Image (cartoon, grey):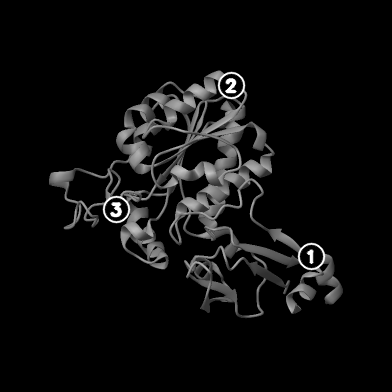
């Protein structure tokens, strides 16, 4: 499976959990820590992200950047 | 540190559009306005028309839209965004002009301006965010509120005898000959957001061809006004809003007309 990962800007995250609902791999979860504005933010908790961008598309605060393995790299790895 | 090493053989596939400013949005957690802003700016970035777009901000929660969208914008009086957009488009016909309005703005105080702008077939795009409530002023009943919806001015639920029926302004204006492209979209799931993006792209393309008014209604949420968590608003939209406001195109141009 092609691997992906997300970088979350925890200071912009408001913890609305819409990305957690949108994620089909259930790889996101709400952190126990809070950010400077007092919101619990989202973090990547499992290493099964496929880089499908669903979480970033529904994120109201554009806090998620998605990276994905390119197809050439994927073939090399296989 | 481990993540940085991991990123080396990966490529960025999605990031915040450069046409959005770095300001922290004032919207409540989970608000559909912010998603609509982001998608609108993504389309502007993809079409490469940042220099040529002029937006008109409304009065309502999205009154500060000009702080977040890195394009030329103008603030209008309550409900008059479509009238202001008309003026801008007539003076600068080569620019892309859109108005961005909520339901209290477009469907309540601005009904006359909305209907007459579309009846004149002004060559603009109108984005209408419908969340069935007045969000900014504290969750009062809007014309688009649903039957039995509890708001701060209808604490026992909206009642037809006193308050009438939910106003389906999109169906109303779809019959006008000046309307070229009328559609209803939503922003609560990734798929609906993708469809909304396509609709926006189509609308800007039609505006380039000078075809007439394009109107996009967006069924959105209001976690604070509805007194729900953002997660609960998703089920509320699916179960209550969408049966009343079904998604889809209400008026699409015939193939030979494009």
Q: Residue B50 falls in which quadrant of the image? A: top right
Circle 2 marks a residue in which chain? B
* Badge nearest the viewer, 3 or 2: 3
Mark 3: few, some, or many residues within 10 Å (few <14, many ≥20)? many
Question: Who is closer to the viewer here, B142 or B84?
Answer: B84
Report the residue at 33% width, 32% height from top.
B111
Question: A66 left or right of A40?
Answer: right
For marks 3 and 2, the one nearer the N-term is: 2
Residue most extreme to the top: B91
Q: CA distance from mark 1 to mark 2?
A: 43 Å
The residue tagged with tag 3: helix, strand or loop? loop
Q: Vertical placement of B6 versus B46: above or below?
A: below
Residue most extreme to the right: A76
Name the residue beneath numbered marker 3: B139
| Residues at marks 1 and 2 on the same chain | no
Question: B4 left or right of A50?
Answer: right
Question: Residue B27, percent across and down?
Answer: 45, 55
Report the residue at 43% width, 32% height from top.
B76
Name the residue beneath numbered marker 2: B93
* Badge nearest the viewer, 1 or 2: 2
Q: CA distance from mark 3 to mark 1?
A: 47 Å
Name the residue beneath numbered marker 1: A70
Q: CA distance from mark 3 to mark 2?
A: 38 Å
Question: B145 left or right of B155?
Answer: right
Circle 3 marks a residue in which chain? B
């Amino acid at each position: 499976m092609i691997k992906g990962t997300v970088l979350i800007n925890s200071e912009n995250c408001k913890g609305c959990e819409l990305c957690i609902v949108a994620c089909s791999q259930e790889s996101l979860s709400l952190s126990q820590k809070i950010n400077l504005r007092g919101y619990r933010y989202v973090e990547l908790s499992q290493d099964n992200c496929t880089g499908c961008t669903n979480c970033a598309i529904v994120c109201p605060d554009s806090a998620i950047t998605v990276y994905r393995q390119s197809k050439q790299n994927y073939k090399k790895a296989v | 540190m481990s993540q940085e090493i991991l990123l080396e053989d990966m490529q960025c596939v999605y990031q915040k559009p450069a046409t959005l400013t770095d300001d922290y949005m004032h919207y409540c957690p989970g608000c559909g306005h912010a998603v609509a802003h982001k998608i609108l700016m993504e389309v502007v970035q993809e079409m490469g028309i940042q220099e040529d777009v002029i937006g008109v901000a409304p009065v309502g929660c999205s009154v500060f839209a000009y702080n977040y969208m890195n394009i030329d914008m103008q603030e209008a009086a309550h409900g008059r965004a479509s009238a202001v957009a008309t003026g801008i488009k007539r003076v600068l016909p080569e620019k892309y002009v859109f108005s961005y309005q909520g339901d209290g703005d477009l469907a309540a105080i601005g009904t006359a301006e909305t209907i007459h702008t579309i009846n004149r077939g002004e060559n603009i795009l109108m984005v209408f965010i419908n969340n069935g409530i007045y969000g900014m002023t504290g969750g009062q009943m809007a014309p688009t509120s649903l039957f039995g919806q509890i708001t701060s001015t209808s604490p026992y639920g909206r009642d037809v005898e006193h308050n009438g029926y939910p106003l389906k302004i999109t169906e109303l204006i779809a019959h006008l000959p000046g309307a070229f492209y009328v559609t209803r979209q939503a922003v609560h799931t990734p798929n609906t957001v993708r469809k909304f993006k396509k609709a926006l792209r189509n609308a800007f393309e039609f505006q380039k061809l000078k075809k007439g008014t394009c109107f996009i209604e967006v069924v959105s949420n209001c976690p604070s006004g509805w007194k729900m968590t953002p997660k609960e608003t998703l089920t509320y939209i699916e179960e209550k809003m969408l049966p009343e406001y079904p998604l889809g195109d209400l008026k699409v141009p015939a193939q030979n007309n494009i």
